Amino acid sequence: MSDSPKKPLRSRQWFGAGGKQGFYYRSWLKGLGAPNDMFDGRPVIGICNTWSELTPCNSSFRDLAEHVKRGVYEAGGFPLECPVMSLGETQMRPTAMLFRNLASMDVEESIRANPVDGVVLLMGCDKTTPSLLMGAASVDLPTIGVSGGPALSGNWRGKPLGSGTGVIEMSEMVRAGTLTQAEFTEAEACMQRSRGTCMTMGTASTMASLVEALGMALPENAAIPAVDSRRMRLAHLSGRRIVEMVREDLSMSKILTREAFENAIRANAAIGGSTNAVIHLLALAGRLGVPLTLDDWDRIGSNLPCLVNLKPSGQYLMEDFYYAGGLPAVLREIATHLHLGAMTVNGRTLGENIAEAPCWNRDVIRPLAEPLMASAGIAVLRGNLAPDGAVIKPSAASPHLLKHRGRAVVFEDIEDFKARIDDETLDIDDTSVMVLKNCGPRGYPGMPEVGNMPLPPKLLRRGITDVVRISDGRMSGTAYGTVVLHVSPEAAAGGPLALVREGDFIELDVAGRRLHLDVSQEELTRRRASWKAPAAPSRGYARQYVEHVQQAHQGADMDFLVGGSGDQVDRDSH
Ligand code: FES
């Protein structure tokens, strides 16, 4: 490691300045107790912290930041921590996803406007990972990710209870009359037993895994439990490493190449990852100018097997995954499918990082030759119902429904769904296809996780646990079922989904990648003539979002945020 940076430090534009301006830049920071030598030309490291008690999954991040700082100081850097918008998946209404792009703007401008040379991103709960990556990518400084880690395994009456997945299962049992409300309430405290993110392979664990697969975090980032001392060690080492990355000028765009994204898509298949990763990676690639399309997900990842036996696709939880070897063991198993020369934040290639990765439990991480499921990656469907595409996660679906033709039971929006789903007179059976409209990026601003519609009690009581469901919304990574999501264009943008009526027949053929509405073009044209776009928000961020958000197949980023503005700011503040 050389002590002199390859590229002049941008922080010198602040701290190396003379006169009144330099005084401003240094004096107020000296008020924190920073000695003179913190301004002597050492790398300044910004730590973007999403700590918040309203994001309980990230509530360990004050401690984590302190461990990062230790590493930064040790390596000769000057750490400065700053809060950035935190998105709590479980608390925010109407959905945390509405604010992903807003948080990314906060992160981008917080980095660019300040005297930092390198960045550490502390991220955990679902949307905190893509928002921080997207914002940082649009600045493109040397950047390292540190995920907060999953919570300890949930346990209810001696049985594993997985975040999200357990809630969905138990709530269906309550609705079917096989679990009491008191038992359901008791389970609340048994699921999230410690700080940390959802401990199923939901969106948070998926994104933490993909951060590692992309090369944006040190090995083992994905799975070390939040409260395990090794998570603090990882933070400490990440603090040391970011200082070196600044000296090496190892910026984000040197790591997030097309090859890195292809590695992440393949990793997502192998872990049985969340469909939300599709939207987040498309948006992230857009920030970097890396060409990536929805069809790449199918072409690159759909024929890979799922090796990780974790809920919701399998039976174990993230703690088990870590003890079994975590993501490095999975990547080693699929090494022949990866770009092993892809650079990672530790200055080594992905291939070097995983070459010796051990696996300690072959039931949790299956060998490539004996997968949990064959061909488990995201499948992209097209047809007259989804001209720009829709996605399904076959590993979470019922095999007997992957090819299906059924009569549509249509809900015009989420209010219509909630008003009628428990109605015993609802005309629905196990061959029906449930259709939910107006839950896309514009229709239910933010595109909430409502696509895995709960089934009606009358079917649950008959022991039916899955029917085909189609919507323009998203689904929690902890959810499961034969659920077609992200239908694009969405209903609120005038997509064909808006034209589906009760009793229409719909054909789903996952192997054939087909989603077809069995209604003539003439009839659809007639229906379109009477279609009206739903009302849009009248002010504020929600209005800006609806006016500028792109469709799901493009990553649902705002059109004016695609790309980056770099790290240069020409004007002084006073
Ligand atoms: Fe925060 Fe799942 S709700 S990680």
Image (spheres, rainbow, N blue to C red):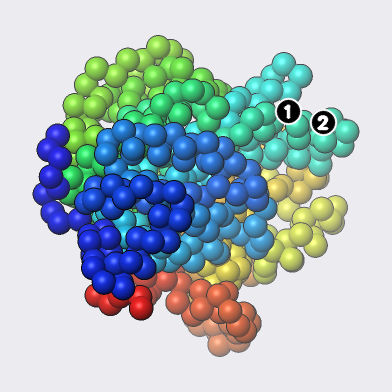
Q: Is residue 267 left or right of 320 when viewed as pictured?
A: left
**Residue located beneath label 1 in the image:** 190
Q: Identify the residue at horizontal 75%, vertical 39% (top origin).
A: 172
Image height of 50 relative to 309, above or below: below
Q: Which mark is residue 486?
A: none
**Residue located beneath label 2 in the image:** 186
Image height of 160 relative to 10, above or below: above
Mark 1: secondary structure: helix
- Residue type beneath disc 1: Cys
Residue 100 lies, in percent from the top left, at 49, 60
- Residue type beneath disc 2: Glu
Outermost residue to the bottom? 529
Residue 182 lies, in percent from the top left, at 88, 33
Mark 2: secondary structure: helix
- Work out whether residue 275 can be spotted: no
Q: Identify the residue at horizontal 39%, vertical 19% (top origin).
A: 325
